[in-house]
Image: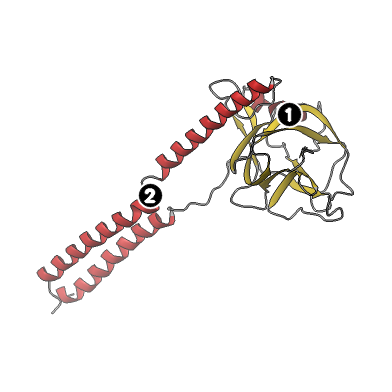
Amino acid sequence: MGVAKIKPTLVFIIFFSYFSLALPVFAQTNPSPSPKGLLPEKDTYVNSAYPNDNFGQKNQLSAGFTSSSNIIFLKFNFEQFPESQLNQGKKAILNLYLSNSTGETKPIEVELLLPKTDWEENELNWNNKPSLYSSGLTTQLEATPGAQKIDLTDLVKQWLTNETENRGVAFYHNLENFSRTFCSKEDEKKPPYLTFEEPTPSGKPQILNQTLNEGEKKGLLALEIVKTKVKGVQKQKSVQNLISEKSILPLTILWLLAFSGFLIKLFKEFPLA
């Protein structure tokens, strides 16, 4: 085979190699999130203004009271999560993503309620919802949109030990002009999920549910929320810094210029004609 026939093949191989290396880099600039945790077996909400409507397939979960009352229902299946997870000192953390908030701008303390009977995601509505009773536990629902963590350790322990039958949990508060809307499991990018995590260095959950006076709750909650957000931003920057959209463009331009210079030199030394 002559030199003239080899050169076009060589150029094709070089170009193919370049794009095979470049395309995976571009594909990684916007990775789709995949939560590393347990997704709900079912989740939905009910609305008093639409007493016969079911919202099981909606991509949102709403709790609170504005012009109507809304109650969130969530249930997890713990067959793959043995009690030993919590015996090792880990905490059961519910991860939610707040997409919208109205009314009170401060975190609202709500009680974790337990359904008296089981319920079906695609059949539940305001009229047929089960009666709810107190779990004796409370949590805080933030007002700022974004990721939110809620400590469900005590409640999950009761479910795993069969101290309380697992029919899920409900979130509700009848404070006037208050609403929190979270992403549901139908939202593939930001669904709710449960993880078993090591305790925070302070030994306190990021969202408190122990009995404290109001001043202690607000101070500790604000501190933990700030720590969580700062750590989250630092981790995100450290992972994405090398392949962010801002750094990809100049790197690609430099790569193309260098590669073009190489091709020009190659064709000068080995002309096709």
Neighbour tally class for label 2: few under 14, some 14-19, many 20 plus, Cα within 10 Å: some
Neighbour tally class for label 1: few under 14, some 14-19, many 20 plus, Cα within 10 Å: many
- Tell me where residue 177 sits by quadrant: top right
Where disc 2 sits, the SS reads loop
Task: Tell me whether the residue at label 2 lies in contact with that at label 1, contact meaning CB atoms closer than 8 angstroms.
Answer: no
On the image, the x and y values in percent for residue 169 come to 77, 37
Q: What amino acid is labelled 2 in the image?
A: Ile
In the picture as drawn, the residue positioned furthest to the left comes out as 269
- Tell me where residue 253 sits by quadrant: bottom left
Sequence-first tag of 2 and 1: 1
Is the image coloured rainbow, by chain, by secondary structure, or in one colour? Answer: secondary structure
Residue tagged 2 = 243
Where disc 1 sits, the SS reads strand
Residue at position x 22%, y 61% from top?
257
Residue at position x 65%, y 43% from top?
192
Q: Quadrant of the N terminus?
A: bottom left
Using residue 133 as the reference point, say whether residue 169 is left or right of it.
Answer: left
On the image, the x and y values in percent for residue 226 come to 53, 31
Residue at position x 25%, y 71% from top?
9
On the image, the x and y values in percent for residue 178 come to 72, 42
Using residue 135 as the reference point, say whether residue 247 is left or right of it.
Answer: left
- Tell me where residue 72 sits by quadrant: top right
On the image, the x and y values in percent for residue 267 come to 15, 70
Q: Is residue 205 visible?
A: no
Rounded to the nearest whole Å, what is the CA distance between mark 2 and mark 1? Answer: 41 Å
Q: What amino acid is labelled 1 in the image?
A: Thr
Residue tagged 1 = 138
In front here: 113 or 36?
A: 113
Using residue 25 as the reference point, say whether residue 78 is left or right of it.
Answer: right
Q: Is residue 180 visible?
A: yes
